[in-house]
Image (cartoon, rainbow, N blue to C red):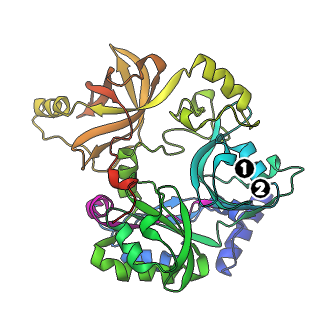
Amino acid sequence: MAGSRQGSAKLLRQIYLKRPLEPEVRHQLTMPIGTAFHERTFALCESLNYREWSGYYAVSSYEPHHEHEYNAIRNAAALIDISPLFKYRITGPDATRLVDRIITRDMKKVAVGQVVYTPWCDERGKVIDDGTVSRLAENTYRWTAADPSLRWFSQNASGMQVQLEDISESISALALQGPTSGRLLKSLVQDADIENLKYFRVTTGKIAGVDVEISRTGYTGDLGYEIWIASEKALKVWDALMDHGVAFDIHAAGMLALDVARVEAGLLLIDVDFNSSKKALVEEQKYTPYEMGLGRLVDLKKNRFVGQAALLEENKRGPAREIVGLAIDWPQVEDLYELVGLPPAISAMASRVAVPIFKEGVQVGKATTSTWSPTLKKMIALATVRREFTRPGTRLQFEITVEAVRHQVGATVVKTPFFNPKRKTQTPVG
């Protein structure tokens, strides 16, 4: 107990004296702190609606309602502070060997300048986390993760010639997402060919004279970029993007708008749609890549990687369950509300409350995230269901509560992403 109090006191002293925090322990803070962009985001946040993200303040919604921010993602340009991501730099002669040992993808097939999305597993093939790995040079990588990962990387690096650096504090990040984001960057960035930057590729350039790395990646399922900046120069880049972005209808966007967009894109969220095997309390909370619908990202033929033996076995027999998309029968929802004399009342925010999924009265799974899609004009959900009910077109039932009474409405299994515009991957961007 005393050690815990001493640790908390140390963290608070670091905050008070404005000393850098140790990145791997920042998520232990009971009181969040601001990112390098907090001075700007706080001034814009009229709603004062925040949430904690890995020890940082993250804006949930800048305005009282996130409608304008969501519309910016889908119809213009949205600027999102994603600095709380854990970020690591891996270098040295054995850097490629280490990355390849941990992730399920084959890193030897990844060229310099390429980015891959990948899960990584424990010895039993259960997912620890997922994130992106950018190959910046022959043996230089930037790795992003939702949870602290330095200890796991270090354990697997034993005996290798490799340097692991936690750059979570020193590097800040912005997601610039939306249909006009490419034209905005093309007109602003120097020393970079933004027009021909392909999907899941990374380049270098300058914004307002500041060196940046720009990857054509994002968490919205739309045309978008992520910008990686030295934290001490982060505000200069924010100001340039916001000032120059006026002509492109740029808006700062928060987590509520991002949450709706990522569900439309069929993208999973840790601690909501799946759990890290390192934090799961029961086996049911642990997922394999196959159960997450990420079997395409598992290369069983590559050199040995952590969890390979277990995944080879699962690949032979098939997963017992899988995360799928569901399209909810909206007319049935309307009918339920009409029966009690009310208009439909579905929250504009994505719901992270798990609800049961049934097949002919028997529960066969759970919906982990559901939302109304403003773009698709339908109610959609991400759900974990038993393997025999994962085929697209399968009819299931989704539980919904109206006036404290539980009902079941129809739902159809559909392929994800729900929303997949051509502009996301098209080259050039315009």
Q: Are marks 1 and 2 in contact (CB under 8 Å)?
A: yes
Check if residue 69 falls in the magenta segment.
Answer: yes
Label of residue 99 in the image = 1
Q: Which residues are magenta?
A: 66-86
Q: In the image, is 269 to the left or to the right of 347?
A: right
Please report the residue visible at 38 percent of the width from the left and 25 percent of the height from the top.
Answer: 357
Q: Residues within 10 Å of mark 2 (few under 14, many from 20)?
A: many
**Pointer 2 residue:** 95
Left or right: residue 246 versus residue 230 is left
Q: Is residue 59 above or below residue 403?
A: below
| SS assignment at label 1 | helix
Q: Position of residue 277 (x, y in %)?
A: 65, 37
Q: Is residue 422 visible?
A: yes
Q: What residue is rendered at 30% in x and 79% in y? A: 246
Residue 98, image x and y in percent? 77, 49
Secondary structure of the residue carrying tag 2 is helix
Q: Residue 30 vs residue 238: left or right?
A: right
Q: Is residue 81 left or right of residue 358?
A: right
